[in-house]
Image (cartoon, grey):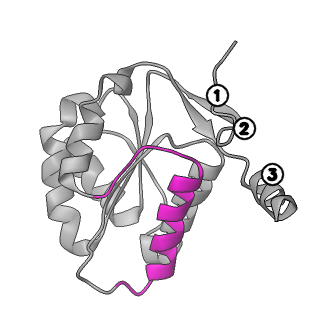
Amino acid sequence: MKKTHPSIASHTAKMYEKKRIGIVAHDYRKRDLLDWAEYNKEILKNHKLFGTGTTGGLIAKKLGLPVHRFMSGPLGGDQQMGAAIAEGKIDILIFFWDPLQAQPHDVDVKALLRIAIVYNIPLACNRSSADFLISSELLNQPYERYLVDYGKRLKNLSVDE
């Protein structure tokens, strides 16, 4: 019998050995992401990569690896990436975001980060967290992540009041 946390998890989602990794970077962080990706090319080549328009194109060109590309972030790519997470098509999100530069599509960025948390996927927003995530022994083995039924949880909260 699978052990779940009764107050948090309602079910799990399986991640396989070959992970589906979403890669995004704001303009002033693209160079840092490209450097990180090149350093980790041998690891990344064993997984399926997804990227928003420009970032995905840069990664594909720099590493010579296939990258499924969504539209550019400001043109809907962040939302497409979020939809892929919600549909169970992306397992991990590496998002080198720029905390100092105002983004015209900031609401889309926040929505993408929120959906990554709602679906409990591993999320790295800077190089250090990306290093820890990509070097985890869990990266190359099956993993079942817990998922919360937020609708049920909200309903239970209103009943408890």
Q: Secondary structure at mark 3?
A: helix
Among numbered discs 2 and 3, the one appearing first in the sequence: 2
Q: Is residue 120 magenta?
A: yes
Return the x and y of residue 39 as percentages of the image width and height. Answer: 12, 40
Q: Along the polypeptide, which appears first: circle 3 or circle 1?
A: 1
Work out whether residue 92 can be spotted.
yes
Residue at 49% across / 59% down in the picture?
A: 70
How many residues crowd around disc 3 within 10 Å: few (fewer than 14), some, or many (20 or more)? few
Q: Which portion, as a residue range, is magenta?
A: 103-125
- Indicate the position of residue 53 as horizontal and vertical percent values: 40, 63
4 sits left or right of 60 in the view: right
- Res. 152 mark: 3
What amino acid is labelled 3 in the image? Lys
Disc 2 and disc 1 in contact, CB within 8 angstroms: yes
Name the residue located 69 percent from the left edge and 35 percent from the top edge. Answer: 6
**Residue 64 appears in the figure:** no
From the top left corner, tell me how far across and down residue 92 is, in percent.
Answer: 43, 43
How far apart are the alpha carbons under marks 2 and 1?
A: 8 Å
Residue 31 included in the magenta stretch of the image:
no
Mark 2 → mark 3, Cα distance in angstroms: 9 Å
Residue type (three-letter) at the residue carrying disc 1? Thr
Which residue position holds label 1? 4
**Residue 80 x %, y %:** 56, 61
Q: Is the Cβ of the residue at disc 2 closer than 8 Å to that at disc 3?
A: yes
State the CA–CA distance, disc 3 to disc 1.
Answer: 16 Å
Determine which of the numbered discs, if any, sits on residue 10 in the image. Answer: 2
Q: Residue furthest front?
A: 161
Q: Residue flagged by tag 2: what amino acid is it?
A: Ser
Residue at 33% x, 65% y is 54
Please give left or right for residue 34 compared with residue 151 in the image: left
